[in-house]
Image (cartoon, rainbow, N blue to C red):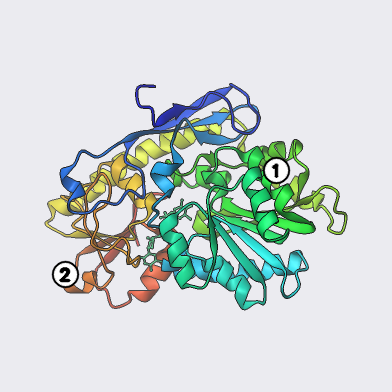
Amino acid sequence: MANKEVKKVVNCRICNSKDLIDVLDLGKQPIPNGFLSEKDLKKKEKRYPLAVVFCKNCSLMQLKYLINPEVMFKNYLYIPSASKTRVEYFKKMAEQVIEVGKLKEGDLVVDVGSNDGSLLICFRNLGMKILGIDPAENLATVAALNGVYTEVGYFDSQFAKKVVKKYRNAKAITATNVIAHIQNLHEVLKGGDILLDDKGIFVMHFPYSMDLIRDNLFDTIYHEHLSYFSIKSLLKLAEESNLEIFDIKKSDLDGGSLRVFWKKKTYKGLKVNTKEIEKLLKEEERFGLHTTRAYKEFAERVKRLKEDSLRELKKIKAKNKSIVGYGAAAKANVLLNYVGIDNKLVDYVVDSTPYKQGLFAPGSHIPIFPEDKIYETNPDYVLIFAWNFSKEIMGKNKGYKGKFIVLVPNFKIL
Ligand code: DWN
């Protein structure tokens, strides 16, 4: 590879197969959370290839090209606490983990990819001891302000050994929207096995590939997300591990996610919900999620979505109407760059994250403002980029008199 920061994937990260089929190419894009300052705008922006392949053997959809995680995660601007809906989910997740894992007051919960500590705070409020693990130095500082201590680094078996030595085994490990960020999944499970108490549970939460494929959620494909999990691929991943999946629950967060519950194979205090897991696997088979056809059709729909969206937005502009964006999400940047939307079509984007305000979206260079800006300029249309939070966004902006639009799963005026 000419660019040393980019590595082409040759073997499937779960089953090692070379039978990887091209699915969708989203072109060369800047990293999705690579927001720019005014000074940065003068510099040449780095772009990296963004494409996905599908493993015919285990049905894991995955990125075709990987970039160095340090480029993406060392200084990270995304925080979950900017969205009320997500924090509500975290509260419920903490309650569920405590119930399923039969946790008691004072038990240790370790969150991998703990970010600003939002999930751990929910556990602390329920009487647990907490510890965060995250590679983002800037977020460890933010978490500390929330009273959450973070061990800075990437979670693997070595890191797990260090944590056990310094603290103790965890009664629960959580990992929300981070497993897809990690290159060596077998190492994550090894680390889980080391860190977990013999009667502990490891709970992972991430977007579900079946929802992504069915509903055209192509903008969740980006450099940070190396894997797009099907249940078939997860079961394959579990084969080599000392951990096993004992339950899987679906969640409607982010357009559809899975919550996957793991425990040590040796721990018999929790029953494996074989019936539910087999039911979910059958649903995938019925849908065709393990066939190349589903991915080819998805790619066709995404290409149409791009053409339709651009045409509709240009029609609006031709009538001299103004359009602004809502939610400078990572997925917003994928959509902007793939569809080819720039600051001539969208005047600005508003976002509740203080760290993003005053910056510019990578690639499109659209400026980011606090949410109130829409009441200053009263745009004709607000394009909701954070479609996963449409309800929350429309709910809190009842005073806005124009129209809301979404482009995913298809162009729609709401
Ligand atoms: O996995 C990941 C997910 C969970 O979070 C990441 N790799 C990165 C990130 O992706 P994202 O940026 O697409 O996530 P969100 O949570 O969908 O982003 C929503 C954005 O919208 C945030 O920047 C906050 C913003 N927002 C807002 O400005 N006002 C959100 C709501 C609900 C609002 O009312």
For mark 2, what is the residue? 377
Q: CA distance from mark 2 to mark 1?
A: 53 Å
Viewer-nearest residue: 363 or 282: 363
Q: Is residue 236 above or below residue 146?
A: above
**Residue 103 location, quadrant:** bottom right
Question: With 326 as the anchor, is 101 left or right in this view?
Answer: right
Q: Which mark is residue 110?
A: none
Viewer-nearest residue: 141 or 219: 141
Residue 288, position in %: x, y? Answer: 61, 36
The residue at the point 69 percent across, 55 percent down is 165
Question: With 89 as the anchor, is 29 left or right in this view?
Answer: left
Under circle 2, the secondary element is helix
Ligand 1, by image quadrant, is: bottom left
Residue 168, position in %: x, y? Answer: 72, 60
Q: Nearer the viewer, mark 2 or mark 1?
A: 1
The quarter of the rendered structure image containing the C terminus is bottom left
Q: Which mark is residue 190?
A: 1
Q: Is residue 370 above or below residue 6?
A: below
**Residue 308 location, quadrant:** top left
The residue at the point 66 percent across, 44 percent down is 157
